[in-house]
Image: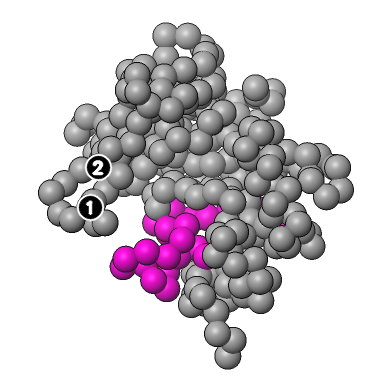
């Protein structure tokens, strides 16, 4: 058996939404962390990817995060981009830094924004919670004039009496950006036990956030790549419980 830096685990479940010789787009289920950590040494998405693509990812090395170009919170489901070659990883990293990779999310939130669509521009700073040693503290985010610039575009896709489904584009990639930004406009995400009020946090069994679309120009071929993942069944049940009609989603034009 190969001596990999990340222990492979072929029992980690994920779906490959797109692949070619240069990159993967992976659909991560909820409740799976993106990368190994304390308590998740063998149960991360990366462990599952090593079971299928171990030689390639090991060759990329720790300096290139073993191909993982970005992450999703444990409870957030949806699409992640993974490089398979050093050249494609570096080219994709450059696209991320130039903000040329568009990442779209579906969020089930309490209430509805005052405007049908808009842009939230509020800087975000990272902080730490708890009194345990620093390396074990949880990272949190907060709005702060001393924080880094953070930009989120949104539009309302469907509404119920006291809830709505938003499509959001994270223009920047700050920690918990969508969660903090949406809460700041009075639309906390259901199931968010860090930033939402307790009644909203109890409104879903998990964070009601899904990374449903990535769109970019392929750095090696120059072709357009536009990959989508439908709203998972568990979040459809949440939408139904809050009387949000999802029937018109297929008729929505592509956003921002």
For the C terminus, the image quarter is top right
Question: Mark 2 against mark 1, which lies toward the viewer?
Answer: 1
For the question of whether residue 203 can be seen, the reply is no
Mark pair 2, 1: CA separation: 8 Å
Disc 2 packing (10 Å; few <14; some 14–19; many ≥20): few
Start-end of magenta stretch: 23-46
- Mark 2 and mark 1 lie on one chain; the one further toward the N terminus is 2
Residue 134's label in the rendered image is 1
Q: Position of residue 200 (x, y in %)?
A: 26, 31
Name the residue that disc number 2 marks: 128
Q: Are marks 2 and 1 in contact (CB under 8 Å)?
A: yes
Q: Provide the secondary structure element on which disc 1 rests.
A: helix
Q: Position of residue 231 (x, y in %)?
A: 53, 42
Q: Provide the secondary structure element on which disc 2 rests.
A: strand
Q: Does residue 114 sit above or below 207 in this rendering? A: above
Q: Does residue 28 sit above or below 76 in this rendering? A: below
Q: Position of residue 167 (x, y in %)?
A: 54, 28
The residue at the far left in this view is 131
Q: Position of residue 90 (x, y in %)?
A: 70, 52
For the N terminus, the image quarter is bottom right
Q: Does residue 225 sit above or below 33 in this rendering? A: above
- Residue 25 in magenta? yes
The residue at the far bottom in this view is 1
Disc 1 packing (10 Å; few <14; some 14–19; many ≥20): few
Residue drawn at 27 percent across, 31 percent down: 196
Main secondary-structure element of the magenta-colored stretch? loop
């Amino acid at each position: 058996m190969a001596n990999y830096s990340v222990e492979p685990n072929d029992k980690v479940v994920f779906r490959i939404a797109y692949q070619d010789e240069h990159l993967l787009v992976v659909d991560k289920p909820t409740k799976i962390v993106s990368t190994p950590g304390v308590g998740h040494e063998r149960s991360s998405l990366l462990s599952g990817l090593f079971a299928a693509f171990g030689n390639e990812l090991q060759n990329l090395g720790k300096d290139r995060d073993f191909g993982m170009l970005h992450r999703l919170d444990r409870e957030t489901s949806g699409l992640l981009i993974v490089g398979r070659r050093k050249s494609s990883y570096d080219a994709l990293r450059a696209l991320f830094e130039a903000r040329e990779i568009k990442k779209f999310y579906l969020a089930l939130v309490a209430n509805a924004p005052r405007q049908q669509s808009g842009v939230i521009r509020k800087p975000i700073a990272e902080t730490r919670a708890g009194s345990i040693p620093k390396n074990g503290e949880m990272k949190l985010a907060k709005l702060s004039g001393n924080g880094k610039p953070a930009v989120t575009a949104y539009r309302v896709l469907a509404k119920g009496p006291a809830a709505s489904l938003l499509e959001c584009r994270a223009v920047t990639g700050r920690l918990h950006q969508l969660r903090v930004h949406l809460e700041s406009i009075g639309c906390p995400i259901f199931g968010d036990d860090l930033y939402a009020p307790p009644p909203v946090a109890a409104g879903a069994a998990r964070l009601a956030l899904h990374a449903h679309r990535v769109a970019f120009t392929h750095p090696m071929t120059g072709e357009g790549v536009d990959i989508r993942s439908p709203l998972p069944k568990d979040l459809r049940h949440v939408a139904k419980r809050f009387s949000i009609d999802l029937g018109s989603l297929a008729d929505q034009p592509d956003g921002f």
